Image (tube, helix red, strand yellow):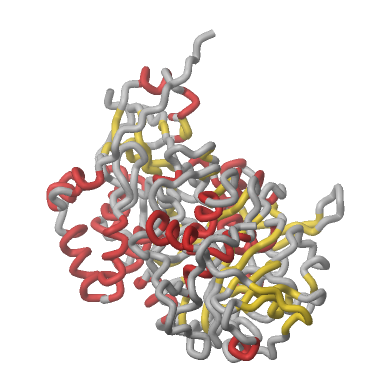
Amino acid sequence: MATSGAEPRCAGLQGGSEDARPEAKAACTPSEIMAAVAARELKDGEVVFVGIGLPNLACNLARATHAPNLVLIYESGAVGAVPERLPVSIGDPALVTGSLMVAPMTDIFQYFLQNGRIQVGFLGGAQLDRWGNINTTVVGPYGKPKVRLPGSGGASEIAVHAKRTLVIMKLGKRAFPAEVDFITSPGMRYHGTHRRELGMPGAGPIKVVTDRCIMEPSAEGELEVSALYPGQTLESCQAEVGWPLKARASLGSVEEPTAGELKLLREVLDPKKLFLKG
Amino acid sequence: MKGKVVTMKEAVASFVKDGSTVVIEGFTHLICFAAAHEIIRQKRRGLTLCRLTPDLVYDQLIAAGCAKKLVYSWAGNPGVGSLHAFRRAVEGAAGALETEEYSHFGMVARFQAGASGLPFGVLRNYMGTDLPRVNPNIKSVTCPYTGEVLATVSALRPDVTIVHAQRADAQGNTQIWGLLGVQKEAAFASKHVIVVVEELVDEKVIRADPNRTVIPAPIVSAVVVEPFGAHPSFAQGYYDRDNDFYLAWEAISRDEAAFKTYLDEFVYGLPDRAAYMAKNKGLAERLKAKPMVCGGVSYGY
């Protein structure tokens, strides 16, 4: 949907080992492929609760390509934002200029989010577990943390209320443990109980976009590989995850970013590589 | 046009006492650093500081020893990383800083309940997260109409809320545009409100555009005029967010000695915001907003 088959494509991930293609000239970075893959998940006309960083790039890439009518809502209150520069913070003044509406935060959380007006929410974090629960609060015990992270912000309620959430996170053993140290934003199951039984209106993390694969929850709510990026194997993903990662019987494939998508990301959306670093 | 207009020194001396519950709100936009600096200069102690995003402003108050407790929902340097004084206080010896943690929606609901004169706020939230396990003030209620169990948070009633704004008249009729955050809710929830403005305007300017008034005079205790009082935060239409400062803060706040030097030089060493601007040469020119004036509307009948 997002791409046209005729366009030239990038030649796999930089820095890969078994998947590296030395003859390729224009390789793309993990951040670039994650932003491009996430962008394709957005449908034109949807109302999206946007975060800073890769979610913002994904939304603005979608807006510049297949989804010109995407409505971007930032928790700071900007609705229908059309930022002319890359927002460094969630409350950048460029989100206000030219937007369709500036709502107080009471309206954002009650009328938009709690009242079911948000189709897609983006989440990410320090840790994500096999049920899609996300930790942005502490590494280690809450009362005596090894690392104190920023906390929920609006993530916890986005995870509850958005019709569906998309997670963007790079794979890694520490980032994908079997169990997170603290559940900030609920995934598919909370200590065994499915989110539906807990009364959460949204469908939860229906896709996790990583730098090697896409994961989706099984009927039970366990994240499993649903599609592999070019050059990746199930084993290369399993090595980066702290639980026995399963794969769907029939795996989808992911098209690499097109030259057009990469040009937009690199030259228009994040020319200083603030968020496309790695 | 004296009205309620006082200096920052007078406003803080009158309304921010040792042990007060203090709110300096503003979601990224209109964060009143000038007021925080004056609180630090007046060496207030034992404060309970409430804010959705503690931001650099509370990191400075924590580092200066003003805070006893922090009530919040997201403690980071937006787009950059950590608040290091906060982290040192929380990761270090137990009891250095009490904390009470919510999500944004929880804090919004607390302010709204306070502003509405209700004992608690209701929200459909917190199922499936560990937040209620570490914050016993997040409770629940059963809806008498549907039987649904909903989350509750207690009303927040600060002793004083400090709001930065683009303009107000001398009585405190305050107009804000751009991101509104929870400025209105925090002000209505509070026993006292200090409004700090970029510009003091005549009442007829307010009357010409009443829909833009967010905080009305009857709830305002003091009006302070301090242009650029929100730097390194921003004031839409006046000056841009100083993203370079937020980026540079990472190195300053990471190093306790550098943090202390910053406070000595830019807070204790200066009397007020005018002196701060004089010391930060070129700042006003660098961040000055380009005009993008709206068309205006007719209030005629």
> Residue at left 76%, top 79%?
A250
Question: x, y percentage for residue A234?
Answer: 65, 87
Residue A28, image x and y in percent? 45, 72
Q: In the image, is residue B50 above or below residue B260?
A: above
Q: Position of residue A7 (x, y in %)?
A: 53, 61
**Residue drawn 50% across and 40% down?**
B184
Q: Residue at x 69, y 57 (%)?
A: A161
Query: Residue furthest toward the right?
Result: B146
Identity of the residue drawn at 37% across and 42% down = B164
Front-lying residue, A74 or B41: A74
**Residue B108 sits above or below residue A153 on the image:** above
* Image quadrant where one finds the N terminus of chain A: bottom right
- Point out the image quarter for the C terminus of chain A: bottom left
Can see residue A218? yes
Q: Quadrant of residue A243?
A: bottom right
Between residue A32 and residue B291, name the one nearer to us: A32
Q: In front here: A271 or B164? A: A271
Residue B99 visible? The answer is: no
Counting from the top left corner in percent of width and height, residue B139 is at: 70, 63
- Does residue A244 appear left or right of residue B292 in this picture? right
Asked whether A36 or B31 is in front, the reply is A36
Rendered position, B170 above or below B64: above
Number of dots carrying numbers: 0
Q: Quadrant of residue A6?
A: bottom right
**Above or below — where is B228 with respect to B28?**
above
